[in-house]
Image (cartoon, helix red, strand yellow):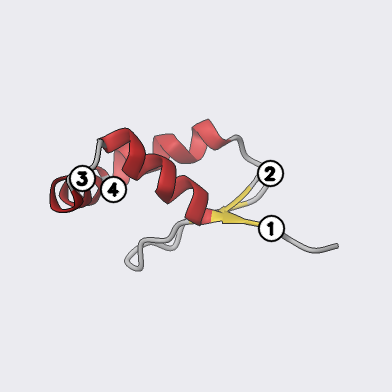
Amino acid sequence: MNFNCVFTSCNYKHNDIEEEEFLKHLKEVHRDEILEISNKENMEIEAVEMITVSNSKVFINS
């Protein structure tokens, strides 16, 4: 899959990686932001991660 991180302060872009690799990026780099969103929106951390992964997927038309 292709990912372009949705966090505006981040320039993470990678093609042909597994979702688990991007999730590792989120947990290592954006841990605080994910916790903040989780608390603010009263959502489980896993739900915030899932939404972030989904919104960061980039589909390339060929």
- Residue type, numbered disc 3: Ser
User: Mark 4 near mark 3, Cβ–Cβ under 8 Å?
Assistant: no
**How far separated are the C-alphas under marks 4 and 1?**
22 Å
- The secondary structure type at the circle numbered 3 is helix
Q: Secondary structure at mark 1?
A: loop
Q: Which residue type carries mark 4?
A: His
The numbered mark, 2 or 1, whose residue comes first in the sequence reads 2
Q: Mark 1 = which residue?
A: 59
Q: Amino acid at mark 1?
A: Phe
Q: Is residue 21 above or below residue 29?
A: above
Residue 4 location (% of width, % of height): 52, 58
* Nearer to us: label 4 or label 1: 1
Q: Dot 4 corresponds to which residue?
A: 30
What is the three-letter code of the residue carrying label 2? Asp
Q: Quadrant of residue 10?
A: bottom left
What is the spatial separation of the Cα atoms under label 2 and label 1, in whole angstroms? 11 Å
Tell me the CA gap for discs 1 and 3. 26 Å
Up/down of 14 relative to 22, above or below: below
Which element type, helix, strand or loop, lies under badge 4?
Answer: loop
Return the residue at label 3.
38
Of the image marks 4 and 3, the number of the one nearer the N terminus: 4
Q: Tag 4: Cα neighbours inside 10 Å, few (<14), some, or many (≥20)? A: some
Residue shown at 37% from the left, 41% from the top: 49
Label 3: how many Cα within 10 Å (few below 14, some 14–19, many 20+)? some
- Count residues near mark 1 (Cα–Cα under 10 Å), then give few for <14, some for 14-19, many for 20+: few
Judged by depth in the image, the label closer to the viewer, 2 or 3, is: 3
Residue situated furthest bottom in the rendering: 8
Q: Which mark is residue 16?
A: 2
Residue placed at 42% from the left, 48% from the top?
A: 51
